[in-house]
Amino acid sequence: KNEVEQSPQNLTAQEGEFITINCSYSVGISALHWLQQHPGGGIVSLFMLSSGKKKHGRLIATINIQEKHSSLHITASHPRDSAVYICAVRSHSNYQLIWGAGTKLIIKP
Amino acid sequence: EAGVTQFPSHSVIEKGQTVTLRCDPISGHDNLYWYRRVMGKEIKFLLHFVKESKQDESGMPNNRFLAERTGGTYSTLKVQPAELEDSGVYFCASSPGTRETQYFGPGTRLLVL
């Protein structure tokens, strides 16, 4: 079992739908990252969280430290949101990022 | 401000050859990280530099991989000799401090035939 699990693996939705991607982890962490990887391959950091909630435009990330769970939400989804969304946690014991497998999101017009 | 850059963007080599990947971090970022994604698997940590020192190289798969960061600026990752299972995408990231957001380069796609 991976230390970071994401669900779903794949998600296809219609433009305008509210999207939720989940991340659960089993290790002690100092921070959790949500990252986006577009088909071209580059990775962009969206959020770094250690508690609570952060919002940037149509993206919202939440984390529940007690439950070891985080969610990434996209409101009013758009085809340009199509990408792979990856959850990664920074371990307490060192500064390594432990990565989830990613969620492939496709938003259809 | 220039982002993290990586060179080359793609490399196709034969098994047994040597390949050197380069990463230029954002200027002033002391922390530099190497990661890789091999086919069908999660991205994995390889190593972490703080300036020119290797802070953590526990993710390096074997002694065919050698990373350097002379002078604490750019870093190179050499694979010698390359094996088929080394194929994948190698990402570099940098951050000002260890607890701060990491900024990623576009990756180098390595294919070993």
Image (cartoon, grey):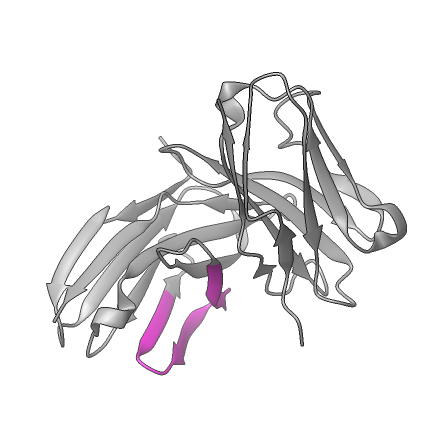
Q: Looking at the rendering, in which quadrant would you find the N terminus of chain B?
A: bottom right
Residue B16 x %, y %? 62, 16
Residue B37: give x, y in percent of width and height.
Answer: 47, 38
Q: Please tell me which residue is depicted at 28% across the width and 69% down the height of the picture.
A: A81
State whether residue A18 is above or below residue B44.
Answer: below
Residue lying farthest to the top in this orientation = B16
Give the left or right position of residue B105, taking residue B98 as reference: left
**Residue A36 magenta-highlighted:** no
In the image, what residue occupies the spot 64% across and 58% down? B5
Q: Is residue B55 left or right of residue A1?
A: right
Magenta range: A43-62
Residue at the spot 55% in from the left edge and 21% down from the top edge: B14
Q: Residue furthest bottom?
A: A57
Q: Main secondary structure of the magenta part?
A: strand
Q: Say whether residue A55 is visible.
A: yes
Is residue A68 shown left or right of residue B45? left
**Which is more toward the observer, B83 or A74?**
B83
Where is residue A63? Give x, y as percent: 39, 63
- Residue A53 lies within the magenta run: yes
Could you tell me residue B83's position as x and y percent?
A: 56, 19
Q: Is residue B57 visible?
A: no
